[in-house]
Image: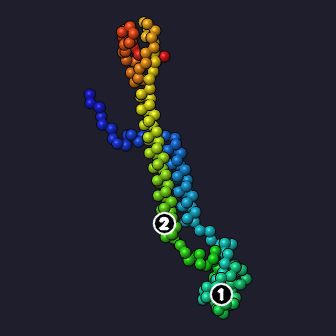
Amino acid sequence: MASAVQPWWHKLLPVAQDRIVILSSGIIALALVGATWTFFTSSGGASVFTHMHCPACEEEYPYNARSAGLKCGNCGYDGGFVATAGPFKEAEVGGAWTKVVLGMLFLALLAQGWAYVVISRLKALKRAAEGAHKQVLVCRCPFCSRKVGFPAYKSGTAGTCPRCKTAFVLAAS
């Protein structure tokens, strides 16, 4: 009977079940949720206003709710001040697209880190499987009591004692 050819992704199943990969996937998912929350939520309300500026001359003053309807002392503009969260000059820099680009860069960084963890674990699991396959076991010949070393994958098969040349079943002891 011919053995069935396994698909390429079958090699990834041990990695998908690995606790370190599952843990790192959870950490990355939490980091993405936190980044999304940070980048795309706005904290509105009057309590976050820190500055006021004149729309005509862009002169800036510390926030004071009572001075919202006053005349500008610099240019004489009588239309009132505009309250901003943070300095007016900083408010102009960036916007929605800046947040999207920063979010995409953060996502790319997390994806690279996750790929590194998965590839490292795949290599480690492969090395461990090869090491277990090449492990040397020792048993004693039932006739002359000599120690006989053999590969772990030959356990349960017939072997021959190098001293007395007697055949016996190799068993780990």
Q: Which residue is rendered at x = 61% and y = 88% of the image? A: 57
- The amino acid at mark 1 is Gly
SS under mark 2 = helix
- Asked whether the residues under the numbered discs 2 and 1 touch, taking CB atoms below 8 Å apart as contact, a structural biologist would say no
- The amino acid at mark 2 is Val
Instruction: Give the residue furthest to the top.
Output: 143
Q: Nearer the viewer, residue 42 or 149?
A: 149
SS under mark 1 = loop
Instruction: Give the residue furthest to the right.
Output: 66
Q: Which residue is rendered at x = 37% and y = 43% of the image? A: 9
- Location of residue 103 in the rendering, given as x and y in whole percent from the top left corner: 50, 63
Q: Is residue 130 visible?
A: yes
Q: CA distance from mark 2 to mark 1?
A: 35 Å
Q: Is 144 placed above or below 139 here? A: above
Q: Which residue is rendered at x = 46% and y = 18% of the image? A: 138
Q: Quadrant of residue 38?
A: bottom right
Instruction: Give the residue furthest to the bottom.
Output: 76
Q: Is residue 168 visible?
A: no
Alpha-carbon neighbours of circle 1 within 10 Å: few (<14), some, or many (≥20)? some
Q: Quadrant of residue 141?
A: top left
Mark seen at residue 101 = 2
Left or right of 100 on screen, residue 156 = left
Q: Is 158 placed above or below 109 here? A: above
Left or right of 12 on screen, residue 27 = right
Mark seen at residue 80 = 1
Q: Is 161 placed above or below 75 here? A: above
